[in-house]
């Protein structure tokens, strides 16, 4: 069972996620599962609380890593808010005309209004490098429900709070007056402003589901068995083992200082190809320096551990780490949050 | 300053362009930046350190009542008409009139737990005519009352905002109670949206002013 330890921020336990970037296929099922569940109301059309972006890439919102926020040596750093153009998305289409207006055979579906310049997955599969050593991988991103949430500290109205029982970061919309300091302070730019309702909004880690022991929709809907979910304090659970025991799951941009609770298993790309078509073993196609720029210096030991255990199992040895990453039993990835949402009478 | 009595319909008082306002004595008030150390958010204190706050430095204020409703006409220079959040990089312009609900209420900190203040608030993106009635008991505690009471009308022309905020003198609800032949303290604030001003980042009349309601 979960071991309870008092944390500095008041949360007694912390829910966390681990995404395996070796298994994420960029299918966007998590993005759409979230979209369908949470962001269909007015003013949320451009909001994608969960996004999957190709790396290397400019991300969503565009170039978010240059916008500031977070902490340096414990001190709040100034940040800026993304513009609508940098978010992109929320495009309007001529659905009425094509789907209901009787022109389905004569008019193509197209966007209406200003020409889109960016969106939640604009630079998909572009990546970097030159053939035959081009490379890319997918990075799912959502609110990190940080241990030191910069958004929460930035709010002058005390509209945000971190739940003691599970560390989920939430906003009381009745206290929010749309001042958007949270958007500036979040270095991951995962807070959205609802222009119509004049409030800020972000991922709520599906807390109504979690309270019923149902994993968040992005987790449960993943068809690739690429994401684990559970209490970071549950030492026997896969999340704690991947993050704390084996230290192969790392936060994105740890230098932002907010201590995220979404972690990533770094991708091990294939080896580089030599000009004669042979493998340059030992030289990864995804530069380790690039992974270090995303996940910090600990990515090197994480990659070493992963490579060592892969080698071990290839040679017939046993590895609990590899067995965990393979995820033989789907529901083991998010126990005890494995209740079927279809069984529940949702209010 | 004085709130003169005029035999005019509230509808007329609410019109910032009504010619009757020309006869109402006006006061030019100097506005100051809100002090950064009073900002309740550590992020705001860090991010705005050394940055200018309080873009609007002068406010022209007039006040009049018709025995039932009292109106404040505020006018200030603002080259940018911010009626909404634009592309996300600006805020709507706003203004407020503040009263102590207790004679000792501190102005700089927007009241205190024991001594609340009452603000009548206009913001350029609120639905036409609507104002907000706000009670605050210290910085960051401002809370809108369920019923607004405040009516507003605003126009922007030739680089100037002209905004009227009106409200019944007496209320059956939470807010300052006013009456003719009395005086009250009053203060003013303006938020310049293109300068990122919102919340506690604003310019304000540094001290309470005595308002004599004729």
Image (spheres, coloured by chain):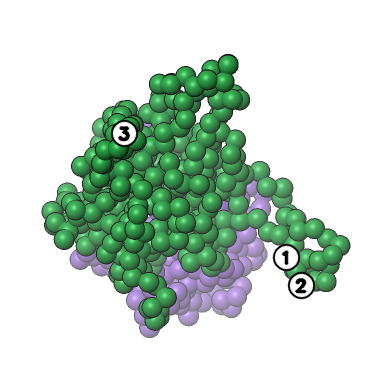
Chain colours: A green, B purple
- The circle on residue A315 is 3
In which quadrant of the rendered image does the C terminus of chain B lie? bottom left
> Residue A106 at what x, y percent from top left?
86, 62
- The circle on residue A226 is none
Please tell me which of labels 1 and 3 falls first in the chain.
1
Q: Report, in whole angstroms, how far the alpha carbon at label 3 lies from the one at label 2.
A: 60 Å
Does the residue at mark 1 contact the one at mark 2 (Cβ under 8 Å)? yes
Question: In the image as oriented, which residue stretches furthest toward the front?
Answer: A316
Badge 1 element: helix
Label 3 marks a residue whose chain is A
Badge 2 element: helix
User: In terms of depth relative to the viewer, which is nearer, B114 or A303?
Assistant: A303
> Residue A186 at what x, y percent from top left?
39, 45
Q: Is residue A169 left or right of residue A4?
A: right
Residue matched to label 2: A100
Badge 3 element: loop
């Amino acid at each position: 069972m979960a071991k309870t330890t008092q944390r500095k921020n008041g949360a007694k336990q912390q829910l966390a996620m681990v995404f395996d970037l070796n298994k994420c296929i960029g299918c966007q099922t998590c993005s759409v599962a979230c979209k369908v569940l949470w962001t269909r109301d007015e003013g949320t059309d451009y909001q994608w609380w969960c996004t999957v972006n190709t790396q290397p890439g400019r991300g969503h919102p565009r170039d978010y890593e240059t916008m500031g926020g977070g902490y340096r040596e414990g001190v709040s750093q100034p940040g800026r808010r993304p513009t609508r153009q940098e978010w992109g998305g929320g495009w309007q289409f001529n659905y009425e005309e094509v789907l209901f207006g009787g022109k389905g055979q004569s008019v193509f579906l197209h966007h209406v209004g200003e020409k889109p310049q960016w969106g939640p997955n604009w630079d998909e599969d572009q990546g970097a490098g030159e053939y035959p050593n081009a490379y890319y991988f997918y990075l799912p991103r959502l609110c990190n429900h940080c241990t030191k949430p910069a958004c929460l500290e930035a709010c002058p109205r005390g509209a945000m709070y971190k739940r003691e029982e599970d560390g989920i970061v939430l906003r009381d919309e009745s206290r929010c007056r749309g001042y958007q300091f949270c958007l500036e302070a979040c270095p991951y730019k995962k807070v959205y402003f609802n222009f119509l309702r004049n409030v800020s909004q972000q991922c709520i880690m599906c807390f109504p589901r979690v309270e019923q022991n149902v994993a968040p929709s992005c987790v449960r809907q993943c068809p690739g068995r690429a994401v684990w979910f559970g209490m970071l304090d549950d030492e026997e659970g896969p999340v704690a083992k991947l993050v704390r025991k084996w230290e192969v799951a790392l936060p994105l941009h740890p230098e932002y200082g907010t201590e995220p609770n979404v972690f990533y298993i770094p991708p091990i790309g294939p080896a580089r190809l030599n000009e004669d078509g042979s493998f340059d073993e030992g030289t990864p196609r995804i530069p380790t320096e690039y992974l270090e720029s995303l996940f910090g210096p600990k990515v090197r030991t994480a990659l070493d551990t992963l490579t060592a255990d892969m080698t071990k199992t290839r040679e017939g040895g046993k590895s609990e780490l590899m067995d965990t990453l393979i995820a033989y039993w789907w529901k083991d990835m998010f126990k005890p949050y494995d209740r079927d949402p279809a069984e529940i009478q949702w209010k | 300053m004085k709130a003169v009595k005029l035999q005019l319909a509230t509808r007329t008082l609410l019109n910032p362009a009504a010619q009757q306002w020309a006869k109402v004595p006006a006061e030019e008030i100097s506005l100051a930046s809100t002090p950064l150390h009073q900002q309740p958010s550590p992020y705001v204190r860090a991010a705005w350190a050394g940055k200018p706050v309080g873009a609007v430095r002068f406010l022209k204020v007039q006040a009049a009542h018709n025995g039932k409703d009292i109106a404040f006409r505020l006018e200030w220079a603002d080259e940018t008409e911010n009626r909404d959040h634009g592309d996300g990089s600006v805020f709507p312009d706003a203004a407020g009139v503040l009263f102590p609900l207790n004679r000792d209420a501190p102005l700089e900190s927007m009241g205190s737990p024991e001594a609340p203040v009452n603000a009548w608030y206009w913001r350029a993106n609120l639905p036409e005519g609507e104002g907000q009635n706000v009670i605050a008991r210290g910085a960051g505690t401002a809370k809108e009352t369920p019923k607004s009471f405040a009516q507003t009308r605003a126009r922007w022309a030739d680089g100037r905002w002209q905004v009227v905020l009106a409200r019944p003198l007496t209320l059956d609800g939470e807010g300052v109670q006013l009456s003719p032949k009395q005086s009250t303290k009053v203060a003013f604030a303006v938020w310049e949206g293109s300068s990122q001003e919102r919340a506690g980042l604003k310019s304000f009349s540094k001290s309470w002013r005595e308002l004599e309601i004729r």
